[in-house]
Image: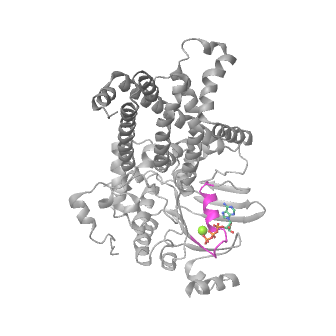
């Protein structure tokens, strides 16, 4: 085998995904008060924080599922922000970016009228316009990858929570996202089902998927995260690698929060 | 006077009764279909971000639910041609008038049913569709619609049965539907029991067939995998796949 002399593509200078000073209000209530976060290609960042601190809202804004009042969402150096009050046609413009920033939800949100296989085929068929045969083959391969090949014909309500969440991950993978956003993917699961979902997520991380994960699964944070991000009252108050974050958190509010989570 | 079975059977199978029944079914089905389409439009307008459109839709529902169906029917058949001369021409038949009146009336009820059906779909479904990169139109067609249909089948079935019976109102505008035929025949031979029973049997037959169709439709919207003999048995094995890492 000869070594290819072609110069390697220079690494992209900027982050894969970046939130730049995001501000989000619901009426008078400022949920996000200038949140900035950058994640490089292949990095995994885990967001923790108390209930109501704005974690889900932050992910929805990053996923372009909600407009922001101020700030930018930058995907591979491209400003893809959705601002409040943006005119008609905005949603059509956003659709292609949304599939690159695919979100996985706490309550799975599988389509109940479609089988596991059909759930995974929706993206390839209707977003990527893949022919049906090929979409089916791709979906089947993805279900195998999340170890659900034998459940392809099942409807969501016929699957356990852990299985549903793995189908949801396969469904997201089917649109070939550049970044995956997970919002408490295991917090609706019975304890014995958490592991099977975390396993799939750790594999994705190991394969180089860029991920932002809201989760209080400390084991996942320890094993897969490049950094842990602490959110409180609509702000990021601390970001650190897992070792330092858990052993020597810099912020007093982080210390208090970790105490609560541990008990 | 005894119940004359011969008269009953003759009437039941007479050409007039069969065509009357066909007209009843045709009118109800056409009006229901149009009502679903109009009702969907009105339901979507009621959820519009533009306030005047919401008012128009709410007014429509208010108006057509408040006015008695019979009055609407008489209005379309008698009053409209006075206001619009071209409706005096022969093409404006009793069937067409009954269709217009019943469809517009039923649409107000369907709008409410469809509106609550749309609201019953979990908002997370829309988010899940959008995050895959589906456009709003695709989300509506591929995800929201099927789930709405499932919810609205039973109340729509109710509506259709009501509508089937409302077609008998059209006897006042001399549409030759089932009840008109019955009344006309009765006025000739005065065999009330036999003819009313014949009409009853026809209504029962029509409604029964329809109920059968509805239950088949409901089963199609069960979203359960077919009883798979061996695969079903395999599913009884604990489903959790344990992974060795
Ligand atoms: N659609 C909305 N309208 C109004 N307020 C909202 C809306 N969504 C969220 N909020 C408010 O914004 C704040 C942040 O909510 P968010 O769901 O982002 O928090 P979270 O950190 O994800 O909390 P949890 O850990 O409980 O999931 C909360 O106070 C919530 O009540
Ligand atoms: Mg949340």
- Is A262 drawn above or below residue B70 in the view shown? below
What residue sits 44% from the left and 75% below the top?
Answer: A190
Q: Nearer the viewer, residue A195 or A177?
A: A195
What residue sits 45% from the left and 68% below the top?
Answer: A201
Left or right: B60 as drawn, with respect to A186: right
Q: Nearer the viewer, residue B31 or B226?
A: B31
- Is B205 drawn above or below residue A163 in the view shown? above
Q: Is residue B139 among the parts visible in the rendering? A: yes
What residue sits 78% from the left and 62% below the top?
Answer: A28
Q: Position of residue A230 (x, y in %)?
A: 64, 75
Residue that lies at the very extreme toward the front in this rendered image: B1
User: Where's ligand 2: which quadrant?
Assistant: bottom right
Left or right: B154 as drawn, with respect to A11: left
Q: Position of residue A233 (x, y in %)?
A: 71, 72
What residue sits 33% from the left and 29% below the top?
Answer: B12
Residue that lies at the very extreme toward the top in this rendered image: B89
Q: How is the image coloured?
A: one colour
Please state the extent of the stretch shown in magenta in the rendering.
Answer: A46-65
- Quarter of the picture containing the C terminus of chain A is bottom right
């Amino acid at each position: 085998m000869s070594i290819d002399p072609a110069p390697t593509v220079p690494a992209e200078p900027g982050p894969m995904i970046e939130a730049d000073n995001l501000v989000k209000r619901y009426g008078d209530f400022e949920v996000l008060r200038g949140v900035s976060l950058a994640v490089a290609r292949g990095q995994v960042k885990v967001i923790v924080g108390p209930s109501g601190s704005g974690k889900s809202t932050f992910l929805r804004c990053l996923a372009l599922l909600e407009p922001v009042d101020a700030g930018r969402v930058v995907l591979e150096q491209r400003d893809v922000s959705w601002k409040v009050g943006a005119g008609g046609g905005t949603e059509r413009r956003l659709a292609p970016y949304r599939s690159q920033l695919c979100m996985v939800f706490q309550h799975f949100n599988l389509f109940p009228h479609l089988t596991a296989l059909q759930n995974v085929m929706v993206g390839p068929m209707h977003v990527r316009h893949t022919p049906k045969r090929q979409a089916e083959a791709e979906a089947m391969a993805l279900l195998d990858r999340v170890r659900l090949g034998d459940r392809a014909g099942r409807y969501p309500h016929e699957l356990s929570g852990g299985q549903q969440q793995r189908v949801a991950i396969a469904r997201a993978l089917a649109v070939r996202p550049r970044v995956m956003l997970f919002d408490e993917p295991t917090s609706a699961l019975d304890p014995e089902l958490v592991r099977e979902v975390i396993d799939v997520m750790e594999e994705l991380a190991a394969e180089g998927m860029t991920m932002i994960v809201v989760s209080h699964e400390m084991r996942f944070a320890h094993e897969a995260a490049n950094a842990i991000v602490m959110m409180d009252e609509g702000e990021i108050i601390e970001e650190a690698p897992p070792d330092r974050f858990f052993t020597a958190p810099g912020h007093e509010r982080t210390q208090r929060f970790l105490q609560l989570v541990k008990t | 006077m005894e119940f004359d079975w011969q008269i009953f059977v003759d009437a039941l199978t007479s050409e007039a009764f069969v065509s009357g029944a066909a007209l009843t079914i045709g009118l109800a089905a056409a009006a229901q279909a149009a009502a679903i389409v109009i009702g969907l439009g009105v339901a979507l307008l009621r959820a519009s971000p533009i306030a005047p459109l919401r008012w128009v839709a709410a007014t429509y529902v208010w108006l057509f639910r408040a006015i008695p169906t019979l009055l609407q029917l008489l209005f379309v058949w008698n009053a409209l041609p006075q206001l619009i001369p071209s409706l005096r021409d022969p093409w404006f038949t009793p069937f067409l008038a009954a269709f217009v009146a019943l469809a517009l009336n039923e649409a107000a009820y369907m709008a409410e049913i469809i509106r609550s059906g749309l609201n019953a779909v979990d908002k997370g479904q829309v988010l899940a569709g959008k995050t895959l990169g589906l456009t709003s139109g695709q989300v509506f067609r591929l995800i929201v619609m099927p789930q709405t249909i499932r919810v609205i089948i039973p109340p729509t079935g109710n509506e259709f049965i009501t509508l089937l019976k409302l077609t008998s109102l059209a006897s006042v505008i001399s549409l030759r539907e089932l009840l008109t035929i019955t009344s006309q025949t009765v006025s000739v031979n005065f065999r009330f029991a036999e003819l009313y029973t014949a009409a009853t049997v026809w209504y029962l037959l029509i409604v029964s067939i329809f109920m059968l169709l509805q239950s088949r439709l409901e089963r199609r919207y069960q979203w359960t995998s077919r009883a798979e003999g061996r695969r079903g048995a395999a599913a009884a094995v604990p489903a959790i796949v344990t992974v060795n890492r």
